[in-house]
Image: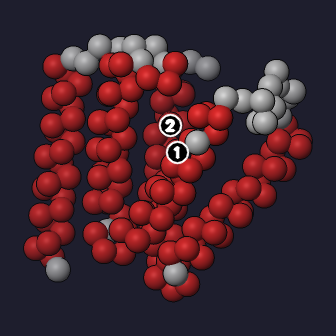
Amino acid sequence: MNLIPLLVVVVAAGAVLSVQAAINGRLGQSVGVLRSSLLTFAVGALVTSLLIVFFQPPQAMSLLQAPKWQLSGALFGVVYMLVMVGAVPRVGTAVATVAVILGQLGMGMLIDHFGWFGNPAMALSGNRILAMLCLALALLFMYRSSLRRS
């Protein structure tokens, strides 16, 4: 896949995450954070199971053969879901999303810089640090503006 269409798809996936956060935040207020998260993971497991059955080509390794540390990534989705369902009703979808992106960017820069988890190392640059600071400022401005409206 060409780089530009791939980035468009990734941006669209980010937009879908914000929609999911807003909807799940409201659902979490109605039925509880844990029930809302359970529904998300149950539906996700069902849809993913169907995709595996009908579209997944054979792989060289099964989940049971994969290194155990790689399986731990599934737990982080649970943390994300629980935090977002609880945070969105309190701070709003935009502030919660920017806060998540700030955390993703910071950790992503560390992973890139040190080449953690078998990823290629990409040196930390002044431009990357500046981008991080700009996003931190955006979060600050968005949060402060939401306080004034309350």
Q: Quadrant of residue 94?
A: bottom left
Crowdedness near tag 2: few (<14), some (14–19) or many (≥20) residues, C-alpha within 10 Å: few
Which sits in the foreground, 90 or 17?
90
- Residue 11 relative to residue 129: left or right: right
Can residue 16 be seen at all in this image of the molecule?
A: no
Residue 84 pos. (x, y %): 42, 63
Q: Which residue is drawn at 21% across and 35% down?
A: 132
Circle 1 sits in a helix, a strand or a loop, which is it?
helix
Circle 2 sits in a helix, a strand or a loop, which is it?
helix
Q: Residue furthest bottom?
A: 30
- Residue 105 relative to residue 63: left or right: left
Residue identifier under label 2? 10
Q: Do the residues labelled 2 and 1 touch (CB within 8 Å)?
A: yes
Residue 104 lies, with reference to residue 80, above or below; the image says: above
Q: From the image, which quarter does the N terminus lie in?
A: top right
- Residue 57 relative to residue 73: left or right: right
Amino acid type of the residue that numbered disc 2 sits on in the rendered structure: Val
Q: Residue furthest front?
A: 68
Residue identifier under label 1? 13
Q: Which residue is drawn at 52% across and 18% down?
A: 118
Residue 93 pos. (x, y %): 36, 64
Amino acid type of the residue that numbered disc 1 sits on in the rendered structure: Ala
Can residue 87 be seen at all in this image of the molecule?
A: yes
